[in-house]
Image (spheres, grey):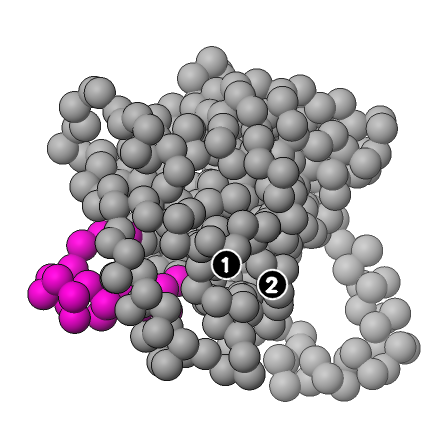
Amino acid sequence: MITRLKPPPNSCFLRLFSSSCHVDSASTSSSQPSLNEVFDREMKRKQRDWAVRQPDFKAAQYLKEEIGWRVADKVFDLTKFNPLVLDIGCGIGHITPHLIKENVGKIIQVDMSGGMTQSSASCDDSEVEVERRTVDEETLEGFQENQFDLLLTSMSAHWINQLPQWMKKCNEILKPDCPFIGSMLAEDTLYELRCSLQLAELERLGGVSSHVSPFVRSQDVGGLLSSAGFDMITLDSDEIEVGYPNMFALMYDLQLMAESHCTHRRNRTIRRDVLIAAEAIYQSMYSKDGKYPATFKIVSFIGWKPGPNMPKAAKRGSQQLSLKDIGKIVEDPEMMKKMSEQGAGKKNDTVKTVI
């Protein structure tokens, strides 16, 4: 469990959280939302622009840094070189610094927030070219069909309004035989905070309103990728638990992450007595060892755009090893060496299916 013990610099927590976001009460979107739009994208842009200007912004990027590293680690598993890569919703660059010239040639970072793209990190490998563009990652305007060799996204896709259309657009701009790798928040994320606020509002107001944004179900991501035209889809679900000194420290960090609530039908204020009650409920129901745990459920995915040279799954029953023997393999250097030599002798990548 990650422990976040540093409290916000301002000790007056209630003043910070009298609204669902600092920028929320200052301005709202004047345009009428479409019936199919859940998230207020203009508000999300303002949240990101506000967050990146805060002095404690970088200290609150621990979760995005961790997930960005995990996405980059999956790129190292690819045997193909990727001349042109698109980092969708790059933020301040959580993926790019970890990539190397052996895997990528040029990276284009895009984010709807100009402040984020201006502050985005370059690649630690100086031979990898990095280009930054302020582009709404929901529309991906300005890119051509079959343009990119690799698409990456980390902790951004859960704010997309139309995921089916967005994934189809990603498929269009990706070249055949090339992968789409990413991670996003999924259902049950921050369930502790959601339940505490709902119970507090039931007690104080006799009803509940929306204060935590909805998330996609993990099992739906594979279907969305398949409908968009991707093949050889791999999904992985994981939970990261972060410990906070109190509920208000969690809410403060969410604002600094630019992960505040931004649905069109959000409640723009939270009453002071509701916050106090929610803090007590959170402590009573979830606190352990003096920490307030917050659960982030991450769904990671890999999908390939079909093509003649795309990796293909092996036939059922063709496996040479069983999962129960993995422990023996790790402890046996000779067996590891033999497997590496066998893998190097193969001409095509093959995904072994363990029955």
What SS does tag 1 mark?
helix
Q: Is residue 139 left or right of residue 254?
A: left
The label nearer to you, 1 versus 2, is 1
Position of residue 151 measured from the top left corner of the image (x, y, whole percent): 56, 35
What SS does tag 2 mark?
loop
Residue occupied by mark 1:
249
Give the residue displayed 26% in from the left and 62% down from the top. Answer: 273
Give the residue displayed 32% in from the left and 35% down from the top. Answer: 24
Q: Quadrant of the N terminus?
A: bottom right
Mark found first going from the N terminus, 1 or 2: 2
The kind of secondary structure the magenta stretch mainly shows is: helix
Position of residue 34 measured from the top left corner of the image (x, y, whole percent): 17, 28
Position of residue 340 measured from the top left corner of the image (x, y, whole percent): 82, 64
Q: Does 243 sit above or below residue 260? A: below
Toward the viewer: 229 or 185? 185
Does 187 lie within the magenta span?
no
Numbered mark located on residue 4 in the image:
2
Q: Does 144 sit above or below residue 158? A: above
Numbered mark located on residue 191 in the image:
none
Three-letter code for the amino acid on which mark 2 is drawn: Arg
Give the residue displayed 74% in from the left and 43% down from the top. Answer: 98
Three-letter code for the amino acid on which mark 1 is drawn: Ala
Q: Does residue 138 appear in this view?
A: yes
Residue span colored magenta: 190-211
